[in-house]
Image (spheres, rainbow, N blue to C red):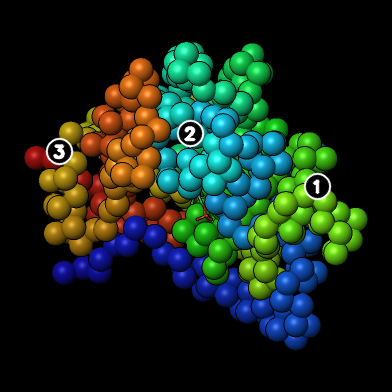
Amino acid sequence: MSERIALADLRAHRATIGADIDRRMAEVVAHGRWINGPEVAEFERAAEHYVGGDVAAVACGNGTDALVLAFQALGLTSGQAVLCPSFTFVATAEAVVACGAVPVFVDVGLDDFNLCPDSVRTAYKAATEEQLDVVGMCAVDLFGAPAKLDQLGELAEELGCWLVSDAAQSFGAEAGGHRVGRLAAVTTTSFFPAKPLGCYGDGGMVLSLDHDLASVVRSLGSHGKGGHKYENVRIGQNSRLDSLQAAVLLVKLDLLDWELAQRRRVADRYSQGLAGAVGTPEVLAGNRSAWAQYTITTDGRDRLQQHLNDQGIDTAIYYPRPLHRQPAYTHFELSSVDLSRTDHLTNRVLSLPMHPYLADDQIDRVIEAVQTGLD
Ligand SMILES: *Cc1c(COP(=O)(O)O)cnc(C)c1O
Protein backbone atom coordinates (compact mmCIF):
# COMPACT_ATOMS: atom_id res chain seq x y z
CA MET A 1 0.00 0.00 0.00
CA SER A 2 1.46 3.38 -0.94
CA GLU A 3 1.64 6.21 1.55
CA ARG A 4 -1.54 8.07 2.53
CA ILE A 5 -2.05 11.38 0.79
CA ALA A 6 -2.88 14.05 3.36
CA LEU A 7 -5.20 16.97 2.78
CA ALA A 8 -2.43 19.44 3.65
CA ASP A 9 1.21 19.35 4.69
CA LEU A 10 1.97 22.13 7.16
CA ARG A 11 5.61 21.14 7.63
CA ALA A 12 6.85 20.61 4.07
CA HIS A 13 8.02 24.24 3.71
CA ARG A 14 10.58 23.57 6.46
CA ALA A 15 12.81 21.65 4.05
CA THR A 16 13.51 24.87 2.14
CA ILE A 17 13.00 27.75 4.62
CA GLY A 18 12.98 26.05 8.04
CA ALA A 19 16.51 27.22 8.88
CA ASP A 20 15.67 30.83 7.95
CA ILE A 21 12.53 30.73 10.09
CA ASP A 22 14.46 29.29 13.03
CA ARG A 23 17.09 32.03 12.66
CA ARG A 24 14.48 34.78 12.72
CA MET A 25 12.75 33.17 15.70
CA ALA A 26 16.11 32.95 17.49
CA GLU A 27 16.54 36.71 16.97
CA VAL A 28 13.23 37.28 18.75
CA VAL A 29 14.35 34.99 21.58
CA ALA A 30 17.56 37.01 21.81
CA HIS A 31 15.93 40.46 21.99
CA GLY A 32 13.00 39.22 24.08
CA ARG A 33 10.43 41.75 22.86
CA TRP A 34 7.74 39.09 22.53
CA ILE A 35 4.96 41.65 22.14
CA ASN A 36 5.26 44.59 19.72
CA GLY A 37 8.79 43.60 18.75
CA PRO A 38 10.27 45.12 15.59
CA GLU A 39 9.19 42.07 13.54
CA VAL A 40 5.51 43.04 13.85
CA ALA A 41 5.87 46.44 12.15
CA GLU A 42 8.32 44.92 9.66
CA PHE A 43 5.75 42.31 8.71
CA GLU A 44 2.98 44.91 8.44
CA ARG A 45 5.11 46.94 6.03
CA ALA A 46 6.02 43.77 4.08
CA ALA A 47 2.33 42.83 3.78
CA GLU A 48 1.49 46.36 2.57
CA HIS A 49 4.24 46.13 -0.02
CA TYR A 50 3.06 42.68 -1.12
CA VAL A 51 -0.54 43.79 -1.54
CA GLY A 52 0.57 46.98 -3.25
CA GLY A 53 -1.25 50.23 -3.81
CA ASP A 54 -1.83 52.46 -0.86
CA VAL A 55 -3.09 49.88 1.59
CA ALA A 56 -2.54 50.13 5.38
CA ALA A 57 -2.03 46.85 7.27
CA VAL A 58 -2.74 46.28 10.96
CA ALA A 59 -1.77 42.91 12.39
CA CYS A 60 -3.93 41.33 15.10
CA GLY A 61 -4.46 38.10 17.03
CA ASN A 62 -6.39 36.02 14.49
CA GLY A 63 -8.78 36.22 11.56
CA THR A 64 -11.88 36.28 13.75
CA ASP A 65 -10.59 39.28 15.72
CA ALA A 66 -9.71 40.94 12.41
CA LEU A 67 -13.40 40.75 11.43
CA VAL A 68 -14.60 42.05 14.81
CA LEU A 69 -12.10 44.92 14.76
CA ALA A 70 -13.06 45.86 11.18
CA PHE A 71 -16.78 45.76 12.00
CA GLN A 72 -16.28 47.82 15.17
CA ALA A 73 -14.16 50.38 13.34
CA LEU A 74 -16.99 50.73 10.83
CA GLY A 75 -19.31 51.42 13.77
CA LEU A 76 -21.27 48.16 13.80
CA THR A 77 -23.35 47.96 16.95
CA SER A 78 -26.35 46.23 18.49
CA GLY A 79 -29.63 46.39 16.65
CA GLN A 80 -27.95 46.45 13.23
CA ALA A 81 -27.71 43.72 10.59
CA VAL A 82 -25.01 42.52 8.18
CA LEU A 83 -25.52 40.49 4.99
CA CYS A 84 -23.16 37.51 4.77
CA PRO A 85 -23.04 34.04 3.25
CA SER A 86 -24.30 31.00 5.13
CA PHE A 87 -21.85 28.84 3.17
CA THR A 88 -18.71 29.88 5.07
CA PHE A 89 -16.69 29.19 8.19
CA VAL A 90 -18.62 30.19 11.30
CA ALA A 91 -16.28 33.08 12.18
CA THR A 92 -17.82 35.33 9.50
CA ALA A 93 -21.23 35.40 11.22
CA GLU A 94 -19.81 34.95 14.72
CA ALA A 95 -17.94 38.26 14.41
CA VAL A 96 -21.19 40.02 13.46
CA VAL A 97 -22.92 38.59 16.54
CA ALA A 98 -19.90 39.49 18.71
CA CYS A 99 -20.64 43.14 17.85
CA GLY A 100 -24.24 42.70 19.02
CA ALA A 101 -25.58 42.74 15.44
CA VAL A 102 -27.42 40.03 13.51
CA PRO A 103 -26.25 38.19 10.40
CA VAL A 104 -28.63 38.01 7.43
CA PHE A 105 -27.72 34.87 5.51
CA VAL A 106 -27.51 35.25 1.75
CA ASP A 107 -27.21 32.55 -0.91
CA VAL A 108 -24.03 31.98 -2.91
CA GLY A 109 -23.52 31.46 -6.63
CA LEU A 110 -22.82 28.01 -8.06
CA ASP A 111 -20.02 29.50 -10.18
CA ASP A 112 -17.65 30.71 -7.46
CA PHE A 113 -19.42 29.53 -4.24
CA ASN A 114 -19.32 33.17 -3.10
CA LEU A 115 -21.95 35.84 -2.37
CA CYS A 116 -24.28 36.16 -5.34
CA PRO A 117 -24.99 39.87 -6.07
CA ASP A 118 -28.59 39.17 -7.15
CA SER A 119 -29.22 37.22 -3.96
CA VAL A 120 -27.70 40.07 -1.93
CA ARG A 121 -30.21 42.46 -3.46
CA THR A 122 -33.16 40.16 -2.71
CA ALA A 123 -31.97 39.43 0.82
CA TYR A 124 -31.47 43.15 1.51
CA LYS A 125 -35.06 43.80 0.48
CA ALA A 126 -36.38 40.89 2.57
CA ALA A 127 -34.38 42.01 5.62
CA THR A 128 -35.59 45.58 5.28
CA GLU A 129 -39.18 44.36 5.05
CA GLU A 130 -38.57 42.51 8.35
CA GLN A 131 -37.55 45.91 9.86
CA LEU A 132 -33.87 44.96 10.06
CA ASP A 133 -31.38 47.82 9.88
CA VAL A 134 -28.91 46.49 7.31
CA VAL A 135 -25.71 48.55 7.50
CA GLY A 136 -23.11 46.34 5.84
CA MET A 137 -22.18 43.22 3.97
CA CYS A 138 -19.34 40.79 4.47
CA ALA A 139 -18.18 38.84 1.41
CA VAL A 140 -16.06 35.71 1.81
CA ASP A 141 -13.45 34.49 -0.71
CA LEU A 142 -14.29 30.85 -0.16
CA PHE A 143 -11.55 28.29 -0.84
CA GLY A 144 -9.24 31.13 -1.93
CA ALA A 145 -11.19 32.52 -4.90
CA PRO A 146 -12.01 36.25 -4.74
CA ALA A 147 -15.73 37.02 -4.55
CA LYS A 148 -17.26 39.42 -7.10
CA LEU A 149 -15.97 42.35 -5.06
CA ASP A 150 -16.33 44.96 -7.82
CA GLN A 151 -20.00 44.20 -8.27
CA LEU A 152 -20.59 43.79 -4.55
CA GLY A 153 -18.83 47.09 -3.84
CA GLU A 154 -21.08 48.93 -6.30
CA LEU A 155 -24.14 47.25 -4.87
CA ALA A 156 -23.06 48.11 -1.32
CA GLU A 157 -22.74 51.75 -2.31
CA GLU A 158 -26.15 51.71 -3.96
CA LEU A 159 -27.73 50.18 -0.84
CA GLY A 160 -25.88 52.57 1.47
CA CYS A 161 -23.91 49.75 3.13
CA TRP A 162 -20.23 49.21 3.77
CA LEU A 163 -18.45 46.14 2.42
CA VAL A 164 -15.90 44.04 4.29
CA SER A 165 -13.99 41.35 2.44
CA ASP A 166 -13.31 38.29 4.64
CA ALA A 167 -10.17 37.08 2.87
CA ALA A 168 -9.13 34.58 5.54
CA GLN A 169 -8.70 31.94 2.83
CA SER A 170 -7.43 34.09 -0.01
CA PHE A 171 -4.35 36.12 0.96
CA GLY A 172 -2.24 36.26 -2.23
CA ALA A 173 -5.20 35.86 -4.62
CA GLU A 174 -5.86 38.43 -7.34
CA ALA A 175 -8.69 39.96 -9.34
CA GLY A 176 -8.25 42.23 -12.32
CA GLY A 177 -4.50 42.50 -11.70
CA HIS A 178 -4.95 43.62 -8.07
CA ARG A 179 -4.15 41.56 -5.03
CA VAL A 180 -6.60 40.70 -2.29
CA GLY A 181 -6.28 43.41 0.36
CA ARG A 182 -7.13 46.24 -2.02
CA LEU A 183 -10.20 44.76 -3.72
CA ALA A 184 -12.49 46.24 -1.06
CA ALA A 185 -12.18 49.27 1.20
CA VAL A 186 -11.67 46.92 4.16
CA THR A 187 -10.23 43.41 4.00
CA THR A 188 -9.51 40.95 6.81
CA THR A 189 -7.34 37.87 6.70
CA SER A 190 -6.06 35.03 8.86
CA PHE A 191 -2.65 33.45 9.29
CA PHE A 192 -3.99 30.28 10.93
CA PRO A 193 -1.52 27.51 9.97
CA ALA A 194 -3.82 25.89 7.38
CA LYS A 195 -4.46 29.11 5.43
CA PRO A 196 -2.43 29.88 2.26
CA LEU A 197 -0.10 32.12 4.33
CA GLY A 198 0.01 30.41 7.72
CA CYS A 199 2.13 31.06 10.80
CA TYR A 200 3.05 28.72 13.68
CA GLY A 201 0.02 29.60 15.77
CA ASP A 202 -2.73 32.21 15.49
CA GLY A 203 -2.47 35.46 13.57
CA GLY A 204 -4.63 37.87 11.59
CA MET A 205 -4.65 41.21 9.84
CA VAL A 206 -6.92 44.05 8.74
CA LEU A 207 -6.00 45.79 5.48
CA SER A 208 -7.62 49.03 4.45
CA LEU A 209 -7.37 51.68 1.78
CA ASP A 210 -8.76 54.07 4.40
CA HIS A 211 -5.83 54.96 6.65
CA ASP A 212 -8.00 56.67 9.27
CA LEU A 213 -10.06 53.51 9.58
CA ALA A 214 -6.83 51.49 9.90
CA SER A 215 -5.75 53.66 12.83
CA VAL A 216 -9.09 53.06 14.53
CA VAL A 217 -8.53 49.31 14.03
CA ARG A 218 -5.07 49.67 15.56
CA SER A 219 -6.48 51.49 18.56
CA LEU A 220 -9.34 48.98 19.02
CA GLY A 221 -6.88 46.07 19.04
CA SER A 222 -4.82 47.81 21.65
CA HIS A 223 -7.42 48.48 24.39
CA GLY A 224 -8.74 51.54 22.58
CA LYS A 225 -5.59 53.51 23.19
CA GLY A 226 -5.29 57.12 22.14
CA GLY A 227 -2.09 59.12 21.75
CA HIS A 228 -0.23 57.05 24.33
CA LYS A 229 -0.53 53.68 26.01
CA TYR A 230 -2.39 54.83 29.13
CA GLU A 231 -4.92 57.03 27.38
CA ASN A 232 -8.05 55.10 26.39
CA VAL A 233 -10.25 56.89 23.91
CA ARG A 234 -12.59 54.02 23.02
CA ILE A 235 -13.56 50.58 24.34
CA GLY A 236 -11.21 48.14 22.68
CA GLN A 237 -9.78 44.72 23.32
CA ASN A 238 -6.42 42.98 23.32
CA SER A 239 -5.65 41.47 19.93
CA ARG A 240 -2.03 41.33 18.82
CA LEU A 241 0.17 39.38 16.48
CA ASP A 242 3.16 38.35 18.58
CA SER A 243 6.75 38.91 17.49
CA LEU A 244 7.49 35.20 17.01
CA GLN A 245 4.57 34.79 14.60
CA ALA A 246 5.62 37.92 12.70
CA ALA A 247 9.14 36.47 12.40
CA VAL A 248 7.70 33.26 10.89
CA LEU A 249 5.45 35.21 8.53
CA LEU A 250 8.26 37.45 7.28
CA VAL A 251 10.11 34.42 5.96
CA LYS A 252 7.00 32.63 4.70
CA LEU A 253 5.79 35.74 2.84
CA ASP A 254 8.95 35.59 0.69
CA LEU A 255 7.98 32.06 -0.38
CA LEU A 256 4.28 32.82 -0.93
CA ASP A 257 4.33 33.53 -4.66
CA TRP A 258 6.23 30.32 -5.34
CA GLU A 259 3.83 28.36 -3.13
CA LEU A 260 0.82 29.92 -4.86
CA ALA A 261 2.27 28.94 -8.26
CA GLN A 262 2.62 25.38 -6.96
CA ARG A 263 -0.99 25.41 -5.75
CA ARG A 264 -2.02 26.53 -9.26
CA ARG A 265 -0.01 23.64 -10.73
CA VAL A 266 -1.92 21.20 -8.50
CA ALA A 267 -5.29 22.80 -9.31
CA ASP A 268 -4.63 22.81 -13.07
CA ARG A 269 -3.65 19.14 -13.04
CA TYR A 270 -6.75 18.21 -11.04
CA SER A 271 -9.00 20.24 -13.34
CA GLN A 272 -7.54 18.63 -16.46
CA GLY A 273 -7.82 15.13 -15.05
CA LEU A 274 -11.30 15.53 -13.56
CA ALA A 275 -13.08 17.69 -16.15
CA GLY A 276 -16.40 16.12 -17.09
CA ALA A 277 -16.28 13.53 -14.28
CA VAL A 278 -17.18 15.86 -11.40
CA GLY A 279 -17.86 19.56 -10.95
CA THR A 280 -14.46 21.27 -10.88
CA PRO A 281 -13.90 24.71 -9.32
CA GLU A 282 -14.18 27.67 -11.64
CA VAL A 283 -11.90 30.69 -11.41
CA LEU A 284 -13.67 33.74 -12.80
CA ALA A 285 -12.06 35.49 -15.77
CA GLY A 286 -9.23 37.80 -14.72
CA ASN A 287 -8.94 36.23 -11.26
CA ARG A 288 -6.31 34.12 -9.56
CA SER A 289 -7.31 31.92 -6.66
CA ALA A 290 -5.02 31.32 -3.68
CA TRP A 291 -6.28 27.71 -3.80
CA ALA A 292 -6.73 27.29 -0.06
CA GLN A 293 -8.83 24.27 -1.04
CA TYR A 294 -9.55 22.39 -4.25
CA THR A 295 -13.22 21.56 -3.92
CA ILE A 296 -15.16 19.37 -6.35
CA THR A 297 -18.92 18.81 -6.46
CA THR A 298 -20.61 15.48 -7.12
CA ASP A 299 -23.92 13.79 -6.35
CA GLY A 300 -22.46 10.63 -4.80
CA ARG A 301 -20.23 12.65 -2.49
CA ASP A 302 -20.37 10.53 0.70
CA ARG A 303 -19.73 7.29 -1.19
CA LEU A 304 -16.83 8.89 -3.06
CA GLN A 305 -15.33 10.19 0.18
CA GLN A 306 -15.45 6.66 1.67
CA HIS A 307 -13.85 5.23 -1.46
CA LEU A 308 -11.02 7.79 -1.39
CA ASN A 309 -10.45 7.08 2.29
CA ASP A 310 -10.19 3.35 1.49
CA GLN A 311 -7.64 4.26 -1.21
CA GLY A 312 -5.51 6.11 1.34
CA ILE A 313 -6.57 9.62 0.36
CA ASP A 314 -7.69 12.19 2.92
CA THR A 315 -10.51 14.54 1.98
CA ALA A 316 -12.69 17.01 3.87
CA ILE A 317 -16.16 18.47 3.61
CA TYR A 318 -16.11 22.27 3.90
CA TYR A 319 -18.71 22.79 5.22
CA PRO A 320 -20.93 19.88 6.26
CA ARG A 321 -23.57 22.27 7.64
CA PRO A 322 -24.27 25.78 6.43
CA LEU A 323 -24.59 28.40 9.16
CA HIS A 324 -28.37 28.72 8.82
CA ARG A 325 -28.57 25.05 9.92
CA GLN A 326 -26.18 25.40 12.87
CA PRO A 327 -27.97 25.13 16.24
CA ALA A 328 -26.61 28.48 17.46
CA TYR A 329 -27.51 30.31 14.25
CA THR A 330 -30.80 28.86 12.92
CA HIS A 331 -32.84 31.65 14.51
CA PHE A 332 -31.12 34.24 12.29
CA GLU A 333 -32.47 32.65 9.11
CA LEU A 334 -35.13 34.71 7.35
CA SER A 335 -37.80 32.42 5.95
CA SER A 336 -38.27 34.81 3.03
CA VAL A 337 -34.65 34.37 1.86
CA ASP A 338 -33.87 31.46 -0.44
CA LEU A 339 -30.71 29.51 0.51
CA SER A 340 -31.24 26.52 -1.76
CA ARG A 341 -27.92 26.80 -3.61
CA THR A 342 -26.15 26.79 -0.24
CA ASP A 343 -28.01 23.59 0.75
CA HIS A 344 -27.31 22.08 -2.67
CA LEU A 345 -23.54 22.71 -2.32
CA THR A 346 -23.40 21.50 1.28
CA ASN A 347 -24.57 18.08 0.12
CA ARG A 348 -22.16 17.86 -2.82
CA VAL A 349 -18.82 19.50 -1.99
CA LEU A 350 -15.66 17.51 -1.33
CA SER A 351 -12.21 19.05 -0.85
CA LEU A 352 -9.28 17.04 -2.22
CA PRO A 353 -5.68 17.10 -0.95
CA MET A 354 -4.24 20.54 -1.77
CA HIS A 355 -0.87 21.99 -0.83
CA PRO A 356 2.18 23.33 -2.70
CA TYR A 357 4.23 20.19 -2.15
CA LEU A 358 1.91 17.59 -3.73
CA ALA A 359 3.86 15.64 -6.34
CA ASP A 360 2.38 15.07 -9.82
CA ASP A 361 2.18 11.31 -9.21
CA GLN A 362 0.24 11.91 -6.00
CA ILE A 363 -2.18 14.19 -7.86
CA ASP A 364 -2.59 11.49 -10.52
CA ARG A 365 -3.31 8.92 -7.83
CA VAL A 366 -6.08 11.14 -6.47
CA ILE A 367 -7.52 11.72 -9.97
CA GLU A 368 -7.56 7.99 -10.69
CA ALA A 369 -9.14 7.20 -7.34
CA VAL A 370 -11.89 9.77 -7.95
CA GLN A 371 -12.59 8.24 -11.36
CA THR A 372 -12.74 4.66 -10.10
CA GLY A 373 -14.85 5.86 -7.15
CA LEU A 374 -17.47 7.22 -9.52
CA ASP A 375 -17.82 3.98 -11.55
C1 LIG B 1 -10.31 30.72 9.10
C2 LIG B 1 -11.39 31.67 8.79
C3 LIG B 1 -11.72 32.74 9.66
C4 LIG B 1 -11.14 32.90 11.02
O1 LIG B 1 -9.77 32.92 11.11
P1 LIG B 1 -9.06 32.53 12.51
O2 LIG B 1 -7.66 33.05 12.32
O3 LIG B 1 -9.13 31.05 12.63
O4 LIG B 1 -9.78 33.23 13.60
C5 LIG B 1 -12.68 33.64 9.25
N1 LIG B 1 -13.34 33.50 8.09
C6 LIG B 1 -13.07 32.48 7.25
C7 LIG B 1 -13.82 32.40 5.96
C8 LIG B 1 -12.10 31.53 7.57
O5 LIG B 1 -11.87 30.51 6.73
Picture disc at residue 215: 1
Residue at point 42%, 40% (across, down)? 88
The residue closer to the viewer here, 367 or 26, is 26
CA–CA distance between discs 1 and 2? 26 Å
Of callouts 2 and 3, which one flags the residue occurring earlier in the amino acid sequence? 2
Of discs 3 and 1, which sits in the foreground? 1
Q: Is mark 3 on a helix, strand or loop?
A: loop
Q: In which quarter of the image is residue 24?
A: bottom right
Checking the image for residue 187, the label placed there is none
Q: Report the residue that reaches farthest toward the left.
A: 375
Tell me residue 100's x, y (percent).
55, 41
The local crowd at label 2, few if under 14, some if 14 to 19, many if 20 or more residues have their Cα within 10 Å, is many
Tell me the number on the disc at residue 300. Answer: 3
Badge 1 density bin: few <14, some 14–19, many ≥20, Cα 10 Å: some
Identify which amino acid the numbered label 1 is placed on: Ser
Q: Which mark is residue 103?
A: 2
* Circle 1: element type: helix
Neighbor class of circle 3 (other Cα within 10 Å; few <14, some 14-19, many 20+) is: some
Question: Which residue lies most toward the right here?
Answer: 227
Mark 2 → mark 3, Cα distance in angstroms = 32 Å
Q: Do the residues labelled 2 and 3 touch (CB within 8 Å)?
A: no
Residue 365, relative to residue 26: is it above or below?
above
The residue closer to the viewer here, 275 or 173, is 173
Q: Height in image: 137 above or below 188?
A: above
Label 3 amino acid?
Answer: Gly
Give coordinates of residue 163: x percent, y percent. Answer: 62, 29
